[in-house]
Amino acid sequence: MVSGGARIMAVNSIAVRTGVMVDQTLADARALCPLLKVEDYDPAGDLADLDKLCHWCIRYSPRVAVSPPDGILIDITGASHLMGGEDKLADDLFRRLSDFGLQARIGVAKTIGAAWAVSHFGNAPVTIVDDKETAAALAGLPISALRVWSDANDRLEQVGLKNIGALIGKPRAPLAARYGEDLIRRLDQALGHRDESLSAIAPLPDYRTSSAFPEPLLLLAQIQGCLESLAGPLAKLLAEKGYGGRRFSLSLYRIDGDVKSLSIRTGSLVQQSSVIVRLIGEKLAAMKEDYDPGCGFELIVLNAYETKIVTARQQQLDQRPGTGEQSAFDMLIDRYGNRLGFDNIGHFVPYQSHIPERSERLISVTDMAPTPTDWPDFANHRQHGHYAGRPIALLPRPEPITALAEVPDGAPVRFDWRRVRHRVIKAEGPERIAPEWWGRLPRHVEPTRDYFRIEDLDGYRFWIFRLGLYERQEKPLWYMHGLFP
Amino acid sequence: MTIPARDIRELKQRISAISDGAEAPMDAPLISTGCLEIDLGLPSAGLATGTVHEIAGAGYRDRSAALGFTLGLTARLLKERPGPLIWCQLRDRDRLHIHAPGLMAFGIDPGRITKVTLNQEADLLWAMEEALDCPYLAGVIGILWSEKLYNFTSSRRLSLRAKKSGVTALMVRSHRANGTSTAKTRWRIANAPSESPNHDKTALPRLGKAQWRVDLTRCGNGFEKKWDVVWNHEAIRFDLASRVANRAPVSAQEPATATG
């Protein structure tokens, strides 16, 4: 029963020593400790900070996940030896977190469940559980260490099952029937009888190289140099496996826990260090203005994502004489894309539509089909030469004009567009473009358009259309849609 | 005081070595416009490659003509040089953007064009400079329509890169453009009434081929020239407009398809 004003949500170890506890009312806590320093509870802010810290933890292993409200899971399988063993890694992590002013509790175990349990309920700030002793280590811990968030804990306690050891070896079916399937699942997960995986906070790189610095780096030029020394081994790694990457990122770990990532994309598979260095180098150079090294960068990691086997065809192309130029073009497109955004670099592809503004599409170079579109073939065979008589420039949207036609279905004799009167002296048409009633909602079907190519007295050539038909008593409206050269 | 001829020769060599890209090397290939009179009117008897050419409309309304003439030169470039083409244009919705099916009708394969859409003029000039460093390209087109940054220095930067790579740049400028630049040629284009193929007197005549008044205002040797030019979209070349050439078809029947 919650009542009586503000309550304590979290305490640090100094407060605990004075007797302040979680869930106490603020008034009681102040009575126990008059010097108590209080901050407003900010769950969203806590989560955001946890998320930031989680990204920082990628320095230890790429497989890192947030475990709300107060935990971070790190999968150090195959990564601990890089730090000289599990104990060294845990000590390093603890020391660095202390430097940030964080009181951390660290548990290392063979399962997520066991690590969570010993970190939350273990005696020491850093607990490392040997693989064979998982059950023994869990046995003494209370049931709530199993991450079961139901009233099962209380009910188990009422019948005298106070710790996890009391559950191990008990018949499973009655336990599950009485206290829920969740309890058994969590128990199995903690003991490693059932798999549990973490979903990593950031996509896992396929390949990565890193260097750590005892003396933090401060200058952009140093980072550039580091990038070059990291790209070489990464490219060598990719080349040895015959792989190329489409996405690369350089993560800069600041000594105060801030992480900055610069990522680039490429249109084709890349395994040359020069390409990686140039594209990321441009991002680094662009960072110059708001470059803030703080106290310096202590770790720099270069990651390769979306790697695929460089196909034999591409290798052949690269070996053909004179194709250094093709790769120079790919490089140009990649540099455009990384500076201007790949959405702004497009190729024209035809689209099966008779409505002029829908008959073409500008597709980003990264979304291109492997075979380029054959426009002449498309125009000849599928559109039956419909493109003859299309203007070179289309207005972004048709602009209404006032036009005067002599005969109902004929071309106008004069019209006003953008406050200028034009007298029509030459005209061709109409070319009727019927609405596409298929694939659209009935009320969205537009009226028929009759297009005319016209030339005015001064020699300007336009593409205009009449919306609607005279014979149906629709009120026809005239629009300017394009310009001929 | 007399200066030995040897010294003058040496001086000239040194000057040409440090001069900018205004003079394309003699062995740079030329792009023919397809029209002998225009080719002969140019100092190098053809449009020089590896340099910058500027095109502007005669007035605001002649933007379509300037775009048409640029596309004509582009079509000639694409015909004579392999490789893709970079088309740089600002995003502004008010500016004329090319329509791919219309390019087909004009005689250009849109599949060879990579269109780069930019937010500001500085980016456009950067993108063109970068493109001119890539000899694989058939050409680079920049559409400015109006300009604030483009000046002598930026044109010189483009020219130097174009000269080095041999890639040709076409720059479409505002009709108000003035001032100096290192462009090899500068063209001013105005719309002109087209010559109707034939006229049966019962209705309005049909449109003829695209026709412009082409004014070569700068070409290096100082002579300004004017032509009435027609774009021949079937042969993909420029022709001179001529009343004599505009005769009725040999067979009296109506042409089967309309042409834009």
Image (cartoon, coloured by chain):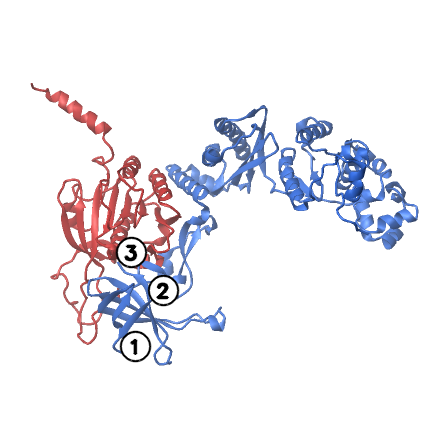
Chain colours: A blue, B red
Spot occupied by residue A448 in the image (x, y as percentages of width and height):
38, 73
How packed mark 3 is, by other alpha carbons closer than 10 Å (few <14, some 14-19, many 20 or more), is: many
Displayed quadrant of residue B106: bottom left
Percent of width and height locating residue A369: 46, 52
Task: Say which amino acid is labelled 2.
Answer: Pro
Q: Position of residue B138 (x, y in %)?
A: 32, 44
Whether residue B260 is visible: no
Residue A77 is labelled as none
Are labels 1 and 3 on one chain? no
Position of A16 compared to A174: left or right?
left
| C-alpha separation, residue under disc 3 versus residue under disc 2 | 25 Å
Residue under label 3 = B107
A440 over A325 or under it: above or below: below
Count how many numbered circles sit on residues in the image: 3
Q: Are marks 1 and 2 in contact (CB under 8 Å)?
A: no
* Separation of residues labelled 1 and 3 (CA atoms): 31 Å
Label 1 vs label 2, nearer the camera = 2
- The reply to whether the C-beta atoms of the residues labelled 1 and 3 are less than 8 Å apart is no
Distance CA(mark 1)–CA(mark 2): 20 Å
According to the picture, the residue beneath numbered tag 1 turns out to be A409
Tag 3 and tag 2 share a subunit: no
